[in-house]
Amino acid sequence: MQKRYQKFLSLLTVFCCICFTGCSTKQTSVSPESEPAATETSPSASVLDHTQSVSPDGKDPAECAYGIKITEETQSPSYTAKKDASVTVLKADASYPVFGIEGNTEAAAQINAAIQAELDTFLNFEKENAANAEEAYLASLDSSDSAFQTYTADFSYQLKRCDDRIISVVFCQSDFSGGAHGNTWSYGVTFHTKTGERLYLESLCSDYTPFHELLINNLNTQAASPAYHDYISTELNSDIDNALLNDSTCWYFDRSGLTFISNPYVLGSYAAGTFEFNIPYAELDGLKSEYAYQGPYIRKLFPGSIVRHDLNGDSSAEDLCYSIQTDADFSSPKPALTINGRDFSEELEQLHLSYLWTGAYYLMDIDSEDPYTEIAISNENTERPKETCTHFFRYHTDGKLVYLGNTAGIFNEDMQVRYNSNGNLILCDRNGNPLG
């Protein structure tokens, strides 16, 4: 894990996903805990805030989806300068999930121990990094060129899939050590819910050789498609096998399939940010049946990806592509949507989708009792977060694109979409509880 941290510090990105949903609501308790300096050159460690989110409404795992209860915990260690205790040289924030599984405390304990190990690696590294922050602070006292900037670090997570078969979590770690921007790195950890075993690509199938070949062929085909033309850098001379398949942490499961993460400078430049490849379960020949997803249809697609799917139940698949048209430097983004060769971009422009960088669009079966598969496109407004929403559409058999409305917030893999009693769409958490 230390090697991954060394790699982590050398990578830059503009993307960091911070999201949590689960069977819990906030209740805070703070336990101060003093910590001695690690070495003679280390700054003083100050209070470590430890916060736990519990369920004051009395819910237990039996009342949560699949009998899995999730408690979010946080830690916030900070380090002050030895020369001046009023100066914070490094502040870290960490949030992480703790799982409870009904009738399977052994599996839950194994999963929680693995997550704790990831957290400990982060916290121990930052404790060592505080010495570097101390040195930077002391150097700033002798320099009139620039003032010292407090080092910061963050450890956050997003739950991608959580059911009776798979628990898959993506962690995002970041460090700011002065300069124009910080360094961030996203990675996945996946577990078999019933046993608590941490899963690796080799353990997803009975015979890894053909499965490995399938993954390489699929990922290479995606990487060569026009959707990734502006994201993959030929100057890096990276190949899929070494960049993705040989990294045990660059993948995760969600309800759509098996997703691979390309962090900055892995396959793409800093400007390209973090981007992903998704292989749907239907194309994962050789995947053990015990890891497959059994819920309603959902498909995550990278903008620019073309897909064939029956959108309206007429037994004829439509050709669909949602993309983001930009200038060469990724400026002036505009949404574009084509279905069966017809351009529906004008309909999207009327919705004023000006904040498009949400990483994916979705096809999903909201109501299994109707013949439609809906299209979901998110619009994240970073300047006015309350205006952030996800738009939904249907494509009718007469060739018309019908707007269904929007829900507040960005849809992600651990959410559900439902119709309420008034016939309006709402976003729900993994337990079916309305959000927002």
Image (tube, helix red, strand yellow):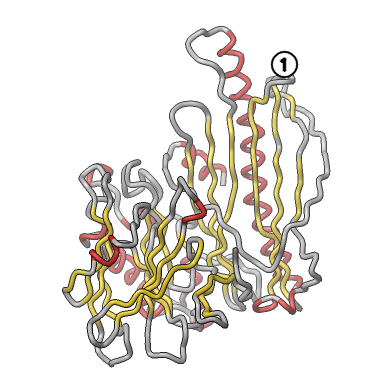
In this view, the residue in front, 75 or 317, is: 317
Q: Quarter of the image holding residue 24? A: bottom right
Looking at the picture, tell me which residue is in the foreground, 384 or 105.
Answer: 384
Read off the residue under disc 1.
84
Q: Position of residue 44 (x, y in %)?
A: 74, 25
Q: Residues within 10 Å of mark 1 (few under 14, many from 20)?
A: few
Residue at x 52% of width, y 78% of height:
418
Left or right: residue 160 compared with residue 372: right
Left or right: 186 as drawn, with respect to 394:
right
Q: Pinpoint residue 283: horizontal percent, then vertical percent.
A: 35, 78
The secondary element bearing badge 1 is classed as loop
Task: Give whichever of 300, 264 is nearer the camera.
Answer: 300
Which is more toward the observer, 226 or 24?
24
Q: Residue at x 47, y 11 (%)?
A: 145
Coordinates of residue 435 in the picture (x, y in percent): 60, 66
User: Compared with residue 185, is residue 107 higher up or lower down, i.e. above or below?
Assistant: below
Looking at the rendered image, the quarter that the C terminus falls into is bottom right
83 sits left or right of 30 in the view: left
The amino acid type found where label 1 is placed reads Asp
